[in-house]
Amino acid sequence: MTSLSQHTREQLKKVSTATIATCLFKKGLKYQFIQGVKPLKKGRRTMVGEAFTLRYIPAREDLNPIEVFKDPKHPQRVAVEECPEGSVMVIDSRKDARAASAGSILITRLMKRGAAGIVTDGGFRDSAEIAALDFPSYHNKPSAPTNLTLHQAIAINEPIGCGDVAIFPGDIIVGDDDGVMVIPAHLAKEVADECLEMTVFEEFVVYKVNEGHPIIGLYPLTDGQIKKEFEAWKAKR
């Protein structure tokens, strides 16, 4: 697993998922935005961390009664206790929110253990309580039934699919008000560096647009004179 440096982590906190999406598209990666998930509460700090995964399969009634939660080796409970500090737990719930992927008690435990956030392509129960936590949480929609009625936790920290995106343990997860992007681990530093440059340029573009400048030649930057203006503007920052 590639380790995410603190420097790269802090860089990624300063860029948007939209900028990351464009950066990855330039590298040929078009499908890194997790589909159908949204933050339970907007306006939070940007979520950044390595993926720690949990995979569900369809529940089978003879193997998934409520008593399985008493098993100290139950994968959902074990995953909560093993998710490393600074990581984002990502749950493959097969895009099915008819039963909850987790609830406020387990997510509070993740928060107290120092995780960076949680994402599921299913739903959470106790959604109002989770939204009130100081903890980035992303799901499809609220769901009251326990996961056992629909999902069976089967694998911890293996490759999964979440919202139509392939996610490998250690991939970098970035979430903001728009949603969640997945950065392949080996590209994290490169993407962070490029996205910071893109962010600076976009600030310049907004500055010029607010001055009344037309988009043509500015965005994308194809006008040589505007490029000189940008370099001069950047040098003054």
Image (cartoon, rainbow, N blue to C red):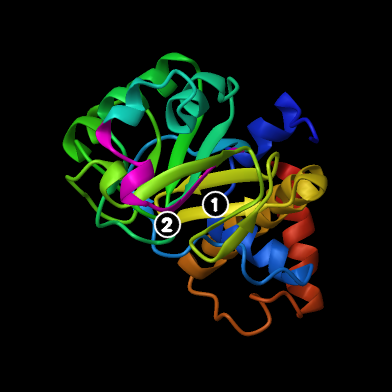
Q: In this view, does 204 lie above or below 158?
A: below
**Amino acid marked by disc 2:** Asp
* Magenta span of residues: 52-66
Can residue 180 be seen here? Answer: yes
**Amino acid marked by disc 1:** Ser
Q: Which numbered marker is on residue 126?
A: none
Quarter residue 125 falls in: top left
Classify the position of the N terminus by image quarter.
top right
Name which residue lies at 56% across and 25% down. 83
Q: Residue furthest front?
A: 62
Name which residue lies at 67% across and 58% down. 201
Q: Do the residues labelled 1 and 2 touch (CB within 8 Å)?
A: yes
Can residue 134 be seen here? Answer: no
Left or right relative to 147: residue 87: right
Left or right relative to 215: residue 198: right
Q: Nearer the viewer, mark 1 or mark 2?
A: 2
Which residue, given by chain and number where applicable, does mark 2 sit on?
Answer: 178
Which residue, given by chain and number where applicable, does mark 1 sit on?
Answer: 16
